Amino acid sequence: AWDERRVVVCDPEGKRLCRIRGTHLSWSPDGEFLVISSNRARTFFDWLFSNPNNDIWIFRPDGSCLTRVTKHPANDIEPSWSPDGKMIAFLDRGNKLGWPDSLFVTSVEEGIPHNLTEGYEGTVLWADWISNEELLLLVCEDVHSRIRLLDIDTGDMKKVMRAVKAAKQLVETIKMVD
């Protein structure tokens, strides 16, 4: 659905540099650009009569150099930069329930999305970069949530642990620190 969500970028003193419609903001590793998920519709009627799905956009903190990275039929959400700033990973919300179900990666230069989870039976709920070659995923398989490590070059996905077990270990670690 069309919404009025906006991201406001401010300098360290709180002065507003720009305001842009979208969600899921992420800074590039060098701090020169931001990536955002947005449908860029200006009004409800723009949204109604155009392609209402979100695409991935990058821009400078002052709002300049707004560039569409993807023009993808799925609803591209939750972009995140690779550590070297050359790639962006994002989820798509292509299923009928509106849940993210596939993980894509695109180079900032070419903007062609590559589905890294094509044929995978589970649902990707979250992803973040571990290195320029690996992504850590939270996936749902049947009724279980699991944490997996994905090699973007080979497509190999390794089970790290069940998410419940990982959460329990994290809580125990926090208790030990306190």
Image: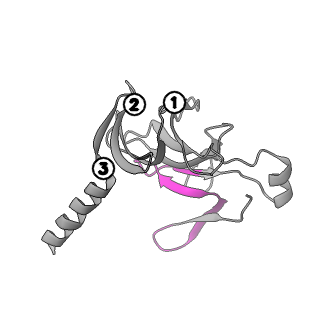
Assign a secondary structure to mark 3.
strand
The answer to if 12 sits in the magenta stretch is yes
Looking at the rendered image, the disc whose residue lies closer to the viewer, 2 or 3, is 3
Tell me: 175 left or right of 35: left
Residue 81 occupies quadrant: top left
Reading the chain from its start, which is encountered first: label 2 or label 1? Answer: 1
The residue singled out by tag 3 in the image is: 162
In the depicted view, which residue is nearer to us: 82 or 94? 94
Q: Amino acid at mark 1?
A: Glu
Q: Secondary structure at mark 1?
A: loop
Quadrant of the rendering where the N terminus is positioned:
bottom right
Q: Residue at x 39, y 30 (%)?
A: 152
Q: Which residue is mark 1?
A: 118
Q: Position of residue 146 (x, y in %)?
A: 35, 47
| Residue type at the position of mark 2 | Ile
How far, Cα to Cα, is label 1 from label 3?
A: 22 Å
- Which residue of the protein is positioned furthest toward the left in this rendering? 176
From the viewer's perspective, is 175 left or right of 141?
left
Is the residue under label 3 in contact with that under label 2 (CB below 8 Å)? Answer: no
- Residues drawn in magenta: 11-36
The amino acid type found where label 3 is placed reads Arg
Disc assigned to residue 152: 2
Number of the front mark, 1 or 3: 3
* Residue 7 quadrant: bottom right
Measured as percent of width and height from the top left, residue 129 is found at 37, 43
Marker disc for residue 165: none
Query: Front-most of 123 and 177?
Result: 123
- Along the line of sight, which residue is nearer the eye, 84 or 50? 50
Whether residue 51 is visible, yes or no, is yes
Dot 1 alpha-carbon crowd within 10 angstroms: few under 14, some 14 to 19, many 20 or more: few
State how far apart marks 2 and 1 are (Cα): 12 Å
Q: Residue at the front extreme? A: 143
